[in-house]
Image (cartoon, rainbow, N blue to C red):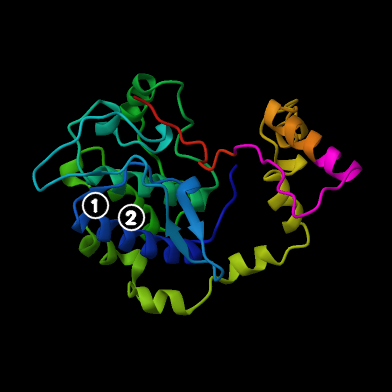
């Protein structure tokens, strides 16, 4: 389980992501890595699509062939090595929306793209009984295995019954905060979760030493930094001191399969 949202909340996220994908596709850009880890939240709980490290610009009529992305979100035409186009992003959006409402992926990831492709081609993507008919229909059209028949344009997307009465105007969407996100921000354990990333009750890897990950052993750079700080404390020198800082990897881990 990866957590669940109500369909009403996901409707807001879906509208904003649909607008974001349409904006990119209008400029010929295919994102190729739409997933939860690449969704950021504003202070009001609205989403921002991030991480364009795998994105690619396709001119009208062009196709891509690189097998890349995050395996459980990858469309069948991407898993097979192409050709594929912007419709692949809408498949990834379908996987994302399915997961947000159900709390699990349609199918667990396989260790390689060939195994994943075989499973995707044979899996029927049955909708959970908890899905409302309009939402189930939306997911069914996003997870169509034939790209040419897949729901892949914003016009078709926002005409679905699931969005009846919803707005796709970015200004109106941003005006109202997403209450469930604000409530999560106010939880008393939020600070601890932000520091650790995972709580003991949610750790998916039994026996994994998270404390070691959060406090890694000293490297030459960190040891030099500690020595400088120790020396400065024992014999302070005139003027400001600037301790050396270890290099930090500013990029988050991204799964890439080539």
Residue 208 spot, x, y in % from top left? 72, 27
Residue extending furthest toward the left = 61
Query: Is residue 232 in the magenta section?
Result: yes
Q: Which residue is mark 2?
A: 138
**120 vs 25: above or below:** above
Tell me which residue sits at (33%, 27%) in the image. Answer: 122
Using the numbered discs, state the Cα–Cα distance from disc 1 to disc 2 in whole angstroms.
Answer: 8 Å
Q: Which residue is mark 1?
A: 151
Mark 1: give few (<14), some (14-19) or many (20+) Cα within 10 Å: many
The quadrant in which residue 116 appears is top left
Query: Is residue 233 in the magenta section?
Result: yes
**239 vs 244: above or below:** below
Magenta-highlighted residues:
229-247
Tell me which residue sits at (36%, 60%) in the image. Answer: 134
Query: In the displayed structure, does residue 68 sit left or right of residue 194?
Result: left
**185 vs 231: above or below:** below
Question: Which of the two labelled residues, at mark 1 and mark 2, occupies the earlier sequence position?
Answer: 2
């Amino acid at each position: 389980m990866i957590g669940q949202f109500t369909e009403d909340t996901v409707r807001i996220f879906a509208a904003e992501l649909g607008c974001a994908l349409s904006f990119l596709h209008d400029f010929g850009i295919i994102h190729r890595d739409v997933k939860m880890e690449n969704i950021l939240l504003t202070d009001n709980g609205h989403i921002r699509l991030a991480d364009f490290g795998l994105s690619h610009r396709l001119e009208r009529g062009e196709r891509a062939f690189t097998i890349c992305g995050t395996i459980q979100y990858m469309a069948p035409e991407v898993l097979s090595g192409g050709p594929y186009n912007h419709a692949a992003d809408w498949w990834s959006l379908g996987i994302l929306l399915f997961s947000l409402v159900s709390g699990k992926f349609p199918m667990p990831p396989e260790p390689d793209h060939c195994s994943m492709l075989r499973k995707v081609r044979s899996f029927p993507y049955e909708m959970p009984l908890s899905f409302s008919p309009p939402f189930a229909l939306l997911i069914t059209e996003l997870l169509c295995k034939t790209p040419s028949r897949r729901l892949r344009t914003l016009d078709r997307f926002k005409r679905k019954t699931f969005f009846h009465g919803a707005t796709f105007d970015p200004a109106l969407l941003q005006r109202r905060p997403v209450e469930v996100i604000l409530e999560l921000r106010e939880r008393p354990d939020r600070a601890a979760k932000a520091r650790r990333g995972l709580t003991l009750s949610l750790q998916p890897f039994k026996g994994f030493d998270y404390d070691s990950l959060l406090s890694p052993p000293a490297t030459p750079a960190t040891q030099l930094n500690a020595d400088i700080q120790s020396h400065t404390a024992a014999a302070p020198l005139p003027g400001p001191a600037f301790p050396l800082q270890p290099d930090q990897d500013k990029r988050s881990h991204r799964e890439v399969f080539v």
